[in-house]
Image (spheres, grey):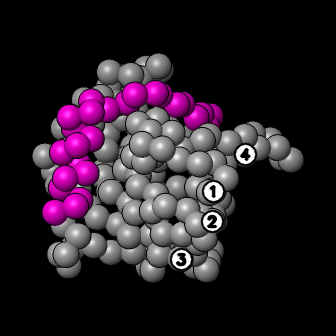
Amino acid sequence: MKTFLLTYENFLEKSLLKQINDYALAALNQANWKSQLFWAPETRRCSDPIHILNLKDKFLEPIQKRFQQVKKRKVDFTIQHLMFNVWAPGSYIEWHGDAAYTFGSTIYLNETWNPDHGGLFLYQTGKYSMKSVLPYFNRCVINSHGLPHTVSPLTPDASLRRTIQIFGTERLS
């Protein structure tokens, strides 16, 4: 299948975003956070920490429903992993294609973000070309079928960057 990249503005209801943020804040002092330490070495390279919290199943249904509402193609998205990520200054992800899944998605949670602070989603559009997606609040990016992409490093003066990361499979309807 051909790769694609879709972007949506104002993807989730603000009340759902608040519930997810509140859940993550309540979990700050709990031991259920992990990091990218066990990712493939070529993906994590020497990134500073990306803190990862698996989201409760109660968030899966409304986000899955939203994916079904906005699909532009006759594609059914099935979410397999749903995570809340906190990116520290100096964190990034090397070029990769999410090979274990047929799609990956990011929903940006910072209400303000300075593009000079990095954290841009970059994706390959040809052998020698790429485009970027700026991480604006409640913007959703969906990339599929191994589309090569990266997240640029956060600068030392960047705020903590918060995202929802979603991985799954798709099938044609």
Which contiguous range is marked in magenta?
A: 1-26
Q: Is residue 46 visible?
A: yes
Going from N to C along the chain, the mark reached first, 4 or 3, is 3
Write the residue at 30% across / 52% down: 82
Alpha carbon of mark 4 to alpha carbon of mark 2: how far?
22 Å
Going from N to C along the chain, the mark reached first, 1 or 4, is 1
Is 26 on the left or on the right of 172, as rendered?
Answer: left
Mark 3 nearby-residue class (10 Å; few <14, some 14–19, many ≥20):
some
Quadrant (top left/top right/bottom left/bottom right) for the N terminus: top right
Quadrant (top left/top right/bottom left/bottom right) for the C terminus: top left
Alpha carbon of mark 3 to alpha carbon of mark 2: how far?
11 Å
Mark 4 nearby-residue class (10 Å; few <14, some 14–19, many ≥20):
some
Going from N to C along the chain, the mark reached first, 3 or 2, is 3
Q: Give the amino acid type for the residue marked by disc 2 in the picture.
A: Thr
Write the residue at 38% across / 70% down: 51
In the displayed image of the protein, which residue is found farthest to the right?
A: 128
Q: Give the amino acid type for the residue marked by disc 1 in the picture.
A: Gly
Q: Which residue is mark 4?
A: 124
Q: Are marks 1 and 3 in contact (CB under 8 Å)?
A: no
The answer to whether 49 is drawn above or below residue 92 in the figure is: below
Residue 125's spot in the image, x, y percent? 75, 39
Q: Are marks 1 and 2 in contact (CB under 8 Å)?
A: yes
Q: Which residue is mark 1?
A: 118
Write the residue at 38% across / 22% down: 70
The answer to whether 6 is drawn above or below residue 154 in the figure is: above
> Helix, strand, or loop for circle 4?
strand
Alpha carbon of mark 1 to alpha carbon of mark 3: how far?
14 Å
Q: Give the amino acid type for the residue marked by disc 3 in the picture.
A: Asp
Label ID, residue 107: none
Q: Which residue is mark 2?
A: 155
